[in-house]
Amino acid sequence: MDSELENMEEHYNISNLEKLVIEKSCKIGYLELGIKEQSLEISKLTKMLRELVNEKLQIKPSDEIVIKLNEIYKKLLKREIDSEGLLYYYPKIKNEKIGYDKLENIIQESPEYKIVQKTPKSDSAFNHSDLEKYS
């Protein structure tokens, strides 16, 4: 009789666990879908904003200032210049209010630059065996 009771408890716990796993998996899928939809919306808005900034500042893709700004941002921040940075720095560089050296100094004093410097440079900085435990 005890073994029957143990079997029932084990089945009951496994059944509950299966339901919980299914429920949580569905919730994760729903959240992931929401994130993907929001990411697409963000991408569309970012593109639209970039186009508006380019139009307002009359910037062409081959503009030397934009190319140099992107080079500086990639070198120091590991990303292309965003619309806010372009809107702020492009006129300053174009009107010679600041030079590229000054811009580099400004970026190197920024919190983003300091965070980027602390970020591991490659995947090898992570211990993959530890990550595999959780996947």
Image: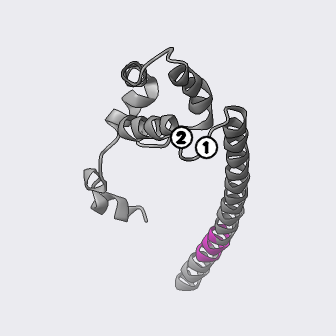
Image x and y of residue 30, in percent: 72, 63
Q: Which residue is mark 1?
A: 60
Which quarter of the rendered picture does the C terminus lie within?
Answer: bottom left
What amino acid type is highlighted by mark number 2?
A: Asp
Q: Which of the two residues, 114 or 25, is positioned nearer the viewer here?
A: 114
Residue found 61% across the figure and 80% down from its top = 8
Residue found 37% across the figure and 35% down from its top = 76
Residue found 43% across the figure and 37% down from its top = 68
Which quarter of the rendered picture does the N terminus lie within?
Answer: bottom right
Q: Secondary structure at mark 1?
A: loop
Q: Which residue is mark 2?
A: 63
Measure the C-alpha gap from mark 2 to mark 1. Answer: 5 Å
**Would residue 92 be counted in the magenta stretch?**
no
Image x and y of residue 133, in percent: 36, 63
Residue found 40% across the figure and 35% down from its top = 72
Q: Which of the two residues, 80 or 28, is positioned nearer the viewer here?
A: 80
In the picture provided, is 102 more to the left or to the right than 88? left
Image x and y of residue 96, in percent: 49, 17
Q: Secondary structure at mark 2?
A: loop
CB atoms at circles 2 and 1 under 8 Å apart?
Answer: yes
What amino acid type is highlighted by mark number 1?
A: Lys
